[in-house]
Image: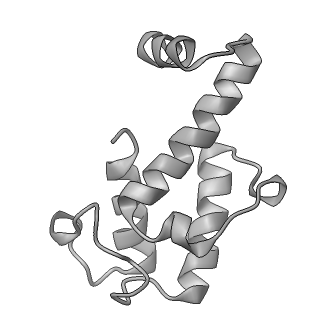
Amino acid sequence: MIHERNIKDYICGTLAPDIDPAMLSADIDLLSTGVIDSLSLVRLVIWIEEEYDIPIGDIEIAPEEFSSIEMINAFIERYTISDVARTKGVNNENEVELLTLTT
């Protein structure tokens, strides 16, 4: 996961400072375990929008997309890769994968 460390650093440094990043697994449900609450979720979404330049207001989102570090990483990759692909005129998944490897 490309963004895992950055996501963990933000969550543990800002939203849940009492949690050690090394103890936070990528698949733990952040919402149901109480690592983040609804207000923290809003702050997380705003951070993702600013940090990764993803226009969240233009995207239909659901809390489940931010329920774990894995899901957050997938969300970021989906929207950042899509933007790069559109900019470069990439039309299929193989070209996106190649573009990702060469960027």
* Placement of 37 over or under 74, stated as above or below: below
Between 84 and 14, the residue placed more toward the observer is 84
4 displayed left or right of 62:
left
Viewer-nearest residue: 101 or 43: 101
Q: Horizontal placement of 64 versus 53: left or right?
A: left
Q: From the top left corner, tell me how far across and down residue 47 is, in percent.
A: 60, 61
- Which image quadrant: the N terminus? top left
Please tell me whether residue 4 is drawn above or below residue 12 in the rendered image: above
Who's the residue at 40% across and 45% down the image? 3
Please give the name of the residue rendered at 28% of the width and 64% of the height, measured from the top-left corner: 27
User: Which scheme is used to colour this image of the protein?
Assistant: one colour
Most extreme residue toward the right, as rendered?
A: 58
Q: Residue furthest left?
A: 23
The quadrant holding residue 86 is top right
Residue drawn at (50%, 88%) of the image: 37
Instruction: Give coordinates of residue 80: x percent, y percent.
Output: 61, 36
Q: Give above or below for 63 relative to 70.
A: below
Q: Position of residue 38 (x, y in %)?
A: 58, 87
Residue 26 image offset from top left, x and y in percent: 28, 60
Task: Give the number of callouts.
Answer: 0
Q: Residue at x 33, y 80 (%)?
A: 17
